[in-house]
Image (cartoon, grey):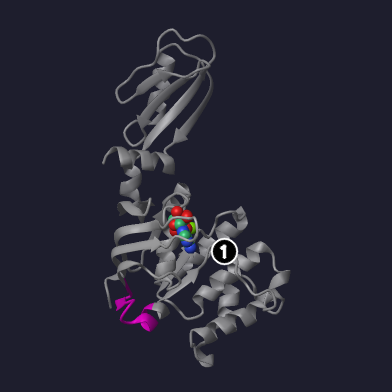
Amino acid sequence: MAANAIEIRGLTKTYEGQGKSPAKQALSNVDLDIPQGSVFGLLGPNGAGKSTLINILAGLVVKTAGQVTIWGFDQDHNPRQSRASIGVMPQELNLDPFFTPRGALEVQAGLYGVPRKQRRSDEILRLIGLEDKADAYARTLSGGMRRRLLLGKALVHHPHILVLDEPTAGVDIELRQMLWENVRQLNREGMTIILTTHYLEEAEEMCDEIAIINLGKVVARDSTSNLLGRLDVKTMIIQPGGPVETLPQGSGLTVSRRDGGAIEITYHSAKTPAETVLAAVREAGISIRDVKTEQADLQDVFLELTRSR
Ligand code: ADP
Ligand code: MG
């Protein structure tokens, strides 16, 4: 058994231009190892190349160059085994409206050559909470139910690796929580999970390790805690109760005035507690009318990463 669920070397994808649209290089020489048993996050803004990478893993997009090994199977030399090792929940809802959830799971299992005896449609229906909709037409299902069915379809062939492409983009909180509970449970049972998202907080909550991808390149790859530790810069914005004569000061604090009279203080939250910042504000004789904090988000991550390079 391979130590890495996925090994990617020199992966490059150029989409051919069509008509007036020029060729587009979506991935440039990507190297990436994804450890077995992890919940691995692939983060990046729209157009970064996340879906391209995932669709190559899923065998839906043909790479231009490079090598992909899935669960120890080279994708070019062992296409069948590498494909059987991975299940993908796609970004878009592509369901046949005339199938029932049970029917859709059975057909998918058939496509993957799962023998009837090894099928476990009932277990999957239970996991995705669609037992009582098992025999309803897909067109009568809500958007959230359809998305859960897509998750179920990705699981029919017992893959070692589950890939979710933006599973929570535009879904409500309840469904998001249900999806995450499912994913956590599957991971506890040993499944390697790869998900893409452009929500940093989601990656922070769910993922052990993260790769940040931007303009078709991996710009960072680290454990979630290391990555966030690099960017624990917080900003506190104070609305003073009256005019401010002296600005607060203190070690580790960077203080400036904002338009409209607010004071902006940036600090590293790992080193400086918020209480210290507030104390410095009070010491400067400033009464606090309102206060809010801003955290580094994905945008800051990119700025930070491109600056330090
Ligand atoms: P992400 O999933 O991170 O938003 P994608 O992998 O979908 O990014 O897209 C990466 C780049 O490749 C984008 O510039 C996108 O416009 C382009 N692209 C994606 N799919 C195609 C395609 N089928 N043909 C041409 N260009 C594409
Ligand atoms: Mg995408």
Relative placement, left or right, of 205 versus 102 is: left
Location of residue 75 with respect to 163 vertically, above or below = below
Name the residue located 50 percent from the left edge and 75 percent from the top edge: 155
Count of numbered marks: 1
Say if residue 297 shows up in the picture.
no
Q: Which residues are magenta?
A: 69-82
Q: Residue 302 in the image: x percent, y percent?
A: 37, 42
* Label 1 lies in ligand 2 vicinity (Cβ under 8 Å): no
Say if residue 292 shows up in the picture.
yes
Relative placement, left or right, of 60 versus 142 is: left
Name the residue located 55 percent from the left edge and 55 percent from the top edge: 169
Secondary structure beneath dot 1 equals: loop
Name the residue located 31 percent from the left edge and 26 percent from the top edge: 252
Residue situated in front as seen by the camera: 265 or 257: 257
Q: Residue 291 in the image: x percent, y percent?
A: 51, 25
The quadrant of the picture occupied by the N terminus is bottom left
Image-quadrant location for residue 285:
top left
Location of residue 290 with respect to 131 vertically, above or below = above
Tell me the amino acid under the disc marked 1: Glu
Q: Residue 299 in the image: x percent, y percent?
A: 43, 41
The quadrant of the picture occupied by the C terminus is top left
Residue labelled with disc 1? 92
101 falls in the magenta region: no
Crowd rating for badge 1 (residues with CA inside 10 Å; few <14, some 14–19, many 20+):
few
Image-quadrant location for residue 149:
bottom right
Residue situated in front as seen by the camera: 52 or 189: 52
Image-quadrant location for residue 152:
bottom right
Relative placement, left or right, of 220 versus 21 is: left
Residue situated in front as seen by the camera: 264 or 214: 214
71 falls in the magenta region: yes
Location of residue 12 with respect to 149 vertically, above or below = above
